[in-house]
Image: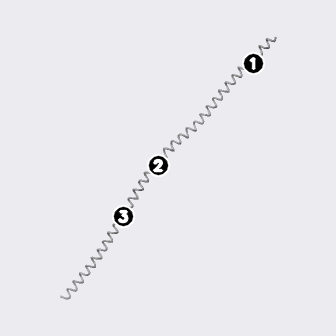
Amino acid sequence: MLSTLVKEHQAKQTARKEAQEQKRREAVAAATNLTEALVDHLNVGVAQAYLNQKRLDAEAKQLHHSATNFAKQTQQWVSLVESFSSALKEIGDAENWAKSIETDMRTITSALEYTYKVSQESS
């Protein structure tokens, strides 16, 4: 009888240990699955952030390139406007010079006409 009780006790202990081991394995598997699910979830966010950062870098490079081209074009426009302004000043100077010559020629013409009239009246 005592040996029967000991054998029953050992059998129950073995059954409990096996059940406990089974529950431990299930808990480890569940924890592993949870960890993998969490890591996968976080990796999706990290991957999306990485892709967004790559896109932002590419757009920043393109913006920098566009800004550089715009600055070059702006400089060309400024040079063109300055040369146009200079040409206008030269035209204004030529016009002023032509008016001065015209005024001088009228003065000379008037003087010659007056001299001719005076010489005609005296002869």
- Secondary structure beneath disc 1? helix
The circle on residue 86 is 3
Q: In the image, 43: left or right of 99?
A: right
> If you read the primary sequence from the N terminus, does the residue marked by circle 1 or circle 2 appear first?
1
> If you read the primary sequence from the N terminus, does the residue marked by circle 2 or circle 3 appear first?
2
> Residue 14, image x and y in percent?
73, 17
Mark 1 is on which residue type? Gln
Residue under label 2 = 64
Q: Which color mode does the image show?
A: one colour
Quadrant hosting residue 47: top right
Q: In the image, 38: left or right of 85?
A: right
> If you read the primary sequence from the N terminus, does the residue marked by circle 3 or circle 1 appear first?
1
Number of residues whose C-alpha sits closer than 10 Å to that of mark 3, classed few (under 14), some (14–19) or many (20 or more): few
Mark 3 is on which residue type? Ser
Q: CA distance from mark 1 to mark 2?
A: 74 Å
Q: CA distance from mark 2 to mark 3?
A: 33 Å
> Residue 55, image x and y in percent?
50, 43
Number of residues whose C-alpha sits closer than 10 Å to that of mark 2, classed few (under 14), some (14–19) or many (20 or more): few
Q: In the image, 20: left or right of 104?
A: right
The circle on residue 13 is 1
Q: Residue at x 60, y 34 (%)?
A: 39
Mark 2 is on which residue type? His
- Secondary structure beneath disc 3? helix
> Residue 93, image x and y in percent?
33, 69
Tell me: residue 120, above or below residue 6: below
Q: Residue at x 60, y 36 (%)?
A: 42
